[in-house]
Image (tube, grey):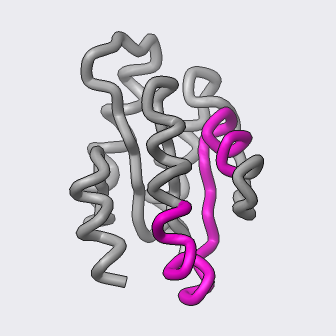
Amino acid sequence: MEIAIIAHDGKKAEMVQFLNEHSNVLHHKNINLISTGTTGEKVSKAGFNVNALLSGPLGGDAQIAARVAEGKCNMVLFFRDPLDRHPHEPDILMLMRLCDVHNVPLATNPATAELLMKSL
């Protein structure tokens, strides 16, 4: 199973904490993590194996959206910062739209991500 993880700058520490809290599930279920570039760097430093793609503003969100459309990515955990502006907002909206089009579970906050992790 492939899970994409993305976190805006103000949410990266929260993503790392979330993954640490769910490391048993991630390792036990043999989950393959992919991420946008900077999130991947933070997660990798925390000891997780992750395939980091481009940074979000440089196309990483679009790369993950393509994997969703191709049927390769099974779940997206995207800790968004709704109080900050993001120059790559069109890519973010495209990713969210494709998750809906292809019926891929998408969590945009830790509470929803928690529910998705419990479903594994």
Q: Is residue 83 above or below residue 109?
A: above
* Residue 26 part of the magenta-drawn span: yes
51 and 82: which one is in front? 82
Q: Main secondary structure of the magenta part?
A: helix
Quadrant in which the C terminus is drawn: bottom left
Picture coordinates of residue 62, whole percent (x, y): 52, 38
Number of disc labels: 0
Picture coordinates of residue 93, whole percent (x, y): 31, 32
Residue at left 74%, top 51%?
Answer: 44
98 and 25: which one is in front? 25
* Left or right of residue 90: residue 111: left
Stretch of the chain drawn in magenta: 20-43
Q: Is residue 30 above or below residue 51?
A: below
Residue at left 61%, top 39%?
Answer: 39
Picture coordinates of residue 48, whole percent (x, y): 70, 61
* Left or right of residue 28: residue 100: left
* Left or right of residue 115: residue 54: right
Residue at left 66%, top 33%?
Answer: 38
6 and 103: which one is in front? 6
The outermost residue toward the bottom is: 28
Picture coordinates of residue 16, whole percent (x, y): 55, 49
Residue at left 76%, top 47%?
Answer: 45
